[in-house]
Amino acid sequence: MIEREPIDGVVIPTEPGARSLVGDDAWRLLFEDRGLLLTWTKAPHSTGDAWGTALRGTSALSQQLGAVLSQAGGAVDASSGLLCRLELPTGSTLRDLVPAVGGGYRGLVRDSRGINGHARLHVHTGRAAAGVGFAPLLGLLAVQVGTEMLARHQQERKLTYIAESVAALRQAREDDMEARLGSVEAALGEASAAMLDRVSIPSSIGLGAARTNLREVKERTLMWLERWEEAARQLPDTGGVDTGRMQDILAAGGPRDDHRQFPHRIAMLYRALTLDSRALVVTGAEAALENGDHSLPHLHEELARGLQRNAAIQDRLKQLMWDLAAPPITYTFPWEGSEAMALDRMLSSMANGISRLPEAPALLTERNRQVLELVRRPDGEVRVLAPRAA
């Protein structure tokens, strides 16, 4: 009996129907970004913080990992659990996501610590669930996880920056719109978990209704943005702006007292853009699986357009805040002085808060490839690990 040469990793072609390849072809697939790399080591006692909830052994992600690892045969000793590392050519989508959620790139790239050039790699081909190629399926799931890691992390920090910049954010609120955004966020979280568990999103989650709510909130906040921009274009190049006029601008066509809702409306606009970017990825991944278009480059092209539109709106939002903060607030009567100064401070602080760029989680290599680390237990349970520091 001829013993099979041990291998150090598996390369899975991203192109469905790729022929069986061996030897240097595995390295060529990686070099040309046409392959997904899976490597593994024995799981240490301490593996770092987990991200999200554990996935059952029956989950789609666990089953696809198990199927790929099983082909490695004796090279894999899973008796005590495995620390698996996926490296995927999906970094461009995550890079497009950063400006769409108003985040920053600092921290996004991690040190490589990848596989060395002497490693023995095996090319895995075959089909996964519902006839989908292993690489496209794992790629879609990994993009989904990376999107949630990045967007949730930066959304939380950006909203904190905005809240820290002005105490008024905790005062005037529009509870109906806030509740609708909360329901959207909950539905997106459940939909993302369902994709990892069963490669589909049950209708019971209500993602369709949540997206309708999100679209309505986003359209309302964009209407405010357009009104603010139109008014900002009419501000004088020199001199100041009267307190009452600025309050009317911030009220966006409503009663003057509505200017007190301005900080909260800005936060809602930012949150709607971020949730919309997350929704684009989760619904795009589901559609790719349902429609039989399993090409990762095609998914990136489809997502890029929507993400770039949201990134452009994020830029408009930043520019608006600096345009409003630029002219000093003037007043006529002495008793208007304190209100004018408070308005001036609020606009300056919000411009600074909306422009701050949260540090990103370390998800990419220097070659723009996404990295996902997870632990697979002997019973098939999978825990995705939180990105370690860059």
Image (cartoon, rainbow, N blue to C red):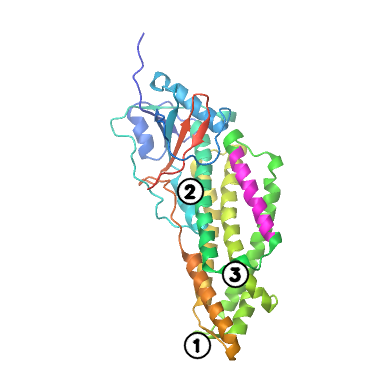
Magenta stretch prevailing secondary structure:
helix
Residue 82, quarter of picture: top left
Q: Which mark is residue 93?
A: 2
Query: Which of the two discs, 1 and 2, sits closer to the camera?
Result: 1
Mark-to-mark CA distance, 1 and 2: 44 Å
Secondary structure under the numbered disc 2 in the rendered image: helix
Q: Position of residue 23 (x, y in %)?
A: 33, 27
Q: Position of residue 8 (x, y in %)?
A: 35, 27
Picture layout, residue 105 above or below residue 294: below
Query: Which of the two discs, 1 and 3, sits closer to the camera?
Result: 3
Please tell me whether residue 189 belongs to the stretch shown in magenta.
Answer: yes
Q: Which residue is mark 1?
A: 239
Q: Label 2 amino acid?
A: Thr
Q: Which residue is mark 3?
A: 168
Mark-to-mark CA distance, 1 and 3: 27 Å
Residue at (62% x, 79% y) in the render: 247
Q: Earlier in the sequence, mark 1 or mark 3?
A: 3
Residue 63, quarter of picture: top right
Left of 2 or right of it: where is 379? right
Magenta segment boundaries in residue numbering:
177-194
Give the residue at the far top of this rendering: 1
Q: Label 3 amino acid?
A: Ala
Picture layout, residue 384 above or below residue 364: above
